[in-house]
Image (tube, helix red, strand yellow):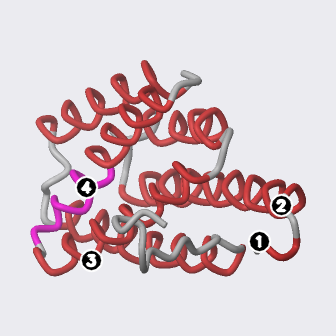
Amino acid sequence: MNSALRGMVVRSVNEEDVEELYAARLLIEKGAVEAAFDAGRLDDTLRMKLADSLKSHRQHANGTSLDDLSKALVHDRAFHSALVAAARIPMISEAHARIVGQTHTVFVSIPGITSARSRSIRTLSTRSSQAKKQIVAALKLHLERSRQNTLRQVKVLAQTMEPDLL
């Protein structure tokens, strides 16, 4: 056995893990967007930054390589992190970074997840300049679609794996 791999545990992801990740993301991102909106921090500068992240994300989201996935996730993280950072609560931003990192680990471990996600991210970009209620609704819709797509992929993966590997 390779000594570098000794003690390494690869844990499979199940539906409960996905539900927990998305519940945490929704609580954090919704609250952060509302706080940022109320403080007047969802300004044109932030909107331009978000639009740039979305544009870059789209360029890679439909790719089929691991490199495309990696680049898409960098831009996905930049988008969601910018939303949360606008609330200016570092403790929340740190917790969010860990949760998004875990979510992205799930994406990397499940074949086919990028194409499903690329459709859901467009919803938020088309509404980012509207009122708080609409922005929050768009964020919730985006996260819900992403949650559903991720759950679908986890179920497909679970069906294709041997029972003793789960």
Number of numbered discs:
4
- Which amino acid type corresponds to the residue marked 3 in the rendered image? Ala
Going from the N terminus, do you reach mark 3 or mark 4 first?
4
Q: Position of residue 100 (x, y in %)?
A: 38, 62
Is residue 46 or residue 103 the one in the foreground? 103
Around disc 1, counting alpha carbons within 10 Å, would you say few (fewer than 14), some (14 to 19), or many (20 or more)?
A: few
Q: Position of residue 39 (x, y in %)?
A: 13, 65
- Which amino acid type corresponds to the residue marked 4 in the rendered image? Ser
For the point 26% across and 27% down, which residue is it? 52
- Which amino acid type corresponds to the residue marked 2 in the rendered image? Met
For the point 71% across and 58% down, which residue is it? 148
> Compared with residue 4, is residue 80 higher up or lower down, i.e. above or below?
above
Q: Is residue 100 left or right of residue 126?
A: left
Q: CA distance from mark 1 to mark 4?
A: 34 Å
Q: Please report contact status of discs 2 and 3: CB closer than 8 Å, yes or no.
A: no
Residue 84 highlighted magenta (yes or no): yes
> Compared with residue 3, is residue 44 higher up or lower down, i.e. above or below?
above
Is residue 150 or residue 164 the one in the foreground? 164
Residue 72 falls in image quadrant: top left
- Which amino acid type corresponds to the residue marked 1 in the rendered image? Leu
Q: Which residue is mark 2?
A: 161
Quadrant of the drawing holding the C terminus: bottom right
Numbered mark located on residue 81 in the image: 4
Q: Which residue is mark 1?
A: 165
Q: Is residue 66 left or right of residue 40?
A: right
Q: Secondary structure at mark 2?
A: loop
Going from the N terminus, do you reach mark 2 or mark 3 first?
3
Around disc 4, counting alpha carbons within 10 Å, would you say few (fewer than 14), some (14 to 19), or many (20 or more)?
A: some
Q: Which residue is mark 3?
A: 95
